[in-house]
Image (cartoon, rainbow, N blue to C red):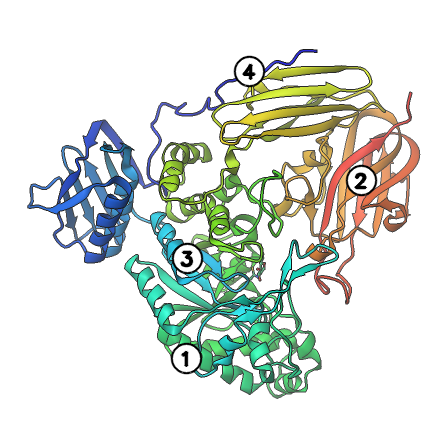
Amino acid sequence: MKTLLSGFLLFAFFFANGQEPCPIIPTPTVYKVIQGEYDLNETLSIARNEMPQNVYNFLEKELESQFEIALQAGGEQSNLRFLKIRNVPEGSYSINVGNEVVVTYSSDESCLHAVISLLQMIHGEHELWMIRKSFVNDSPKFGWRGLHLDVSRHFFSVDEVKRFIDLMTFYKFNTFHWHLTDDQGWRIEIKKYPELTTIGAYRDSTVIGHYGDSPRKYEHQKYGGYYSQEEVKDVVAYAAERYITVVPEIEMPGHSRAALAAYPEYSCTGEENPVPGLWGIFDDIYCSKEESINFMKDILSEVLTLFPSEYIHIGGDEAPKTRWKTCKDCQKVIKENGLKDEHELQSHFIRQIDSYLTEKGRKLIGWDEILEGGLSPNAAVMSWRGEKGGIEAAKQGHNVVMSPTTYCYFDYYQSGHSIEPLAIGGYLPLEKVYKFNPVPSELSVEEAGYILGGQANLWTEYIPDMDHLEYMTYPRALAISQSLWCTQKPSYERFLESYLAYHETFLARNNVNFSRSIHLPEMVIERTDLGINVGFAGATKSAEFDAEVSSWLINEYYSGAVGTGDDNRIFIGREPDGNTVNYSFKIGADMFEDTFMYSLKANADIGIPIELLTPPHPKYDHNGSLNLVDGIEGSMPWKGSEWLGFREPKIEMILDLETVKEVNGVKIGFMDNNGSWIYLPETVIVEASSDKKSWREVNGSDVNESTDDGDFSCSFNVETRYLKITIGAMELIPEGLDGAGNMPWTFIDEIELIYAEK
Ligand code: TNX
């Protein structure tokens, strides 16, 4: 038995096109290099001219702390010269690095943007810092470049919030969406209602592990905190110095258990309930009676004095109508106002808040549920459940901020590796974030004008502290900054070059606990004619692999280069019917001390063509239909990439066996994870055909009768080329179960055909 290890360079594409990577992220509109470097000395003379004091302070502090370079006031012959110019597009700046550095800018804000770019252009090492001679011209594409932070589920101190804002500044975000209230804690002092914080800011326990775990476990410890109004003002001013607008979110009518723990009289039942230590959606929400609306207006009147932002976020998401349906006050409002149902009642609620905010000269923004039952006249929509809500709102002529879960939920996993810390679920690797485009293709040019921009959200159910928050945010925030800033976004590969060449160093220098997940070797599987190709990708500079192949026939070791290029891929062919071969690979990556094990099982259907007549949900569509026959079984805990997720009552697909064969059954893996609204299907029908036209059913079973741990299997005996599988899910999750009233998810992996042993 031989074991061979070999090292090699993965980064074949690094600098492959001959162009140097651009050091600035988000990538500027123009970046042109000229021959040579501009050397920076320990002191740099600067002609400030009209440069704003706060921007100067920022530059001075960063030069000192990152590079130990001091600024010295100089005349017009200075090394570094700032010039404010008129008659150029709003928001633009340019940097000319030749024998001196000349920065021109059009506004105070763009002066800061120029400074940030300049700082990113510095490379080299201590006392040998330099800037590539070059020309930069730049301006942002979207006006809303946001990051959101939920401080309710877990609390972050003022200093931590400022640090979050500092890091946002480096990537030219301009909107900080501060999610200040939710079920699990009220975080902002409201003078008229002191108990919002004395009671509402604290919970007695917090669920440990995943929400979907059964049984659930709790840590019984008081947890909480809040910001005084003085602290809020301090944060708002701190952000303003960096041209970042803070948009507060005060959730209504749902996600309001913390407030109702303090003031139960504003609920429908008046019942006293504690601040919950569990995540999810709760039935108790604000009542729609006048007293509750006035309570909200009182709160907002104080909020408005603290936040000068044009937009005020009022939540509006995930508000079950259970209580409203049986509440006499709510029913009275419905009747008196001639409303059709509880959805219109929610609209009525939001409309009153909308006119209140409009009166005060502000604008309302809410999650896309505010569309249900009719959008209030001045409201803007933040589209999170995909792009649909945003598209609808833009078509109705309302402003929109795009934040679909598919690309923007940074509480999802960034790799499928076991080293990832527990997350809510989902799979959002860097490359997928990079695909985000705030403007859906369905919109006309005019409608696209309503898209203000986009943002990534950091919901913190599973993010308990700052280190973890940075891990989830970086580097994904860099990827989204590209989608929000760049007029013409470069390819992902070009972005990755810039990131690897400059920004990991930058993040490390600033002690950011950024995720190294893109350096983890990742198994890349592609379909081929007679099986699959397996390669290992990952932005790792060098790696080794060692593959063990074992079956009843062979038992030997392979070794080779890691990579996804033609030479570095391993072909795994289909086995004879009834036969299975296990492959395992051991991969080392230089960023990690560990080696990582990967395995897959090859059989007669590995990589066979499958036509998905029902497309998977874009959130859970990793590798498309190949995912179902790639030899890797979906596992738990679930990190999103091994399973295909559907949210349709009927899921249909056709398997092509490529020749007519005798098949004796089929096995399908389903996930059963009700806490995440993932349910086993109700029916599975298998049909056979030799021409894909006429089908005959070969089973007809109720799935619950033949599943074992979520796996469904059935036996039959057919000679066939095609098999059609039709999976029937529940239409809606019934009362009493997790996610009641919503459409369930169906998660599938893997599909295996059963053959008689020959
Ligand atoms: C949905 S996004 C929520 C939040 C959760 C988040 C977790 C939205 C408007 N509501 O309450 O924290 O999912 O991903």
Closest to the camera, between mark 1 and mark 3, is: 3
Foreground of the two, 147 or 371: 147
Q: Residue at x 16, y 51 (%)?
A: 85
- Which quarter of the rendered image does ligand 1 occupy? bottom right
Q: Is residue 626 above or below residue 707?
A: above
Cβ–Cβ under 8 Å for marks 2 and 4: no
Amino acid at pointer 4: Ser
Q: CA distance from mark 1 to mark 2?
A: 56 Å
Q: Which mark is residue 301?
A: 1
Q: Is any part of residue 690 visible from this angle?
A: no
Q: Residue furthest top?
A: 1
Question: Label 4 to label 1, Cα distance in Å?
Answer: 67 Å
The spot of residue 313 in percent (x, y) is: 46, 68
Residue at which label 2 appears: 668
Q: Which residue is mark 4?
A: 6
- The residues tagged by marks 1 and 3 sit, at their Cα atoms, a distance apart of 27 Å
Secondary structure at badge 2 equals strand
Marked residue nearer the N-terminal end (3 or 4): 4
- From the viewer's perspective, is residue 678 above or below residue 353? above
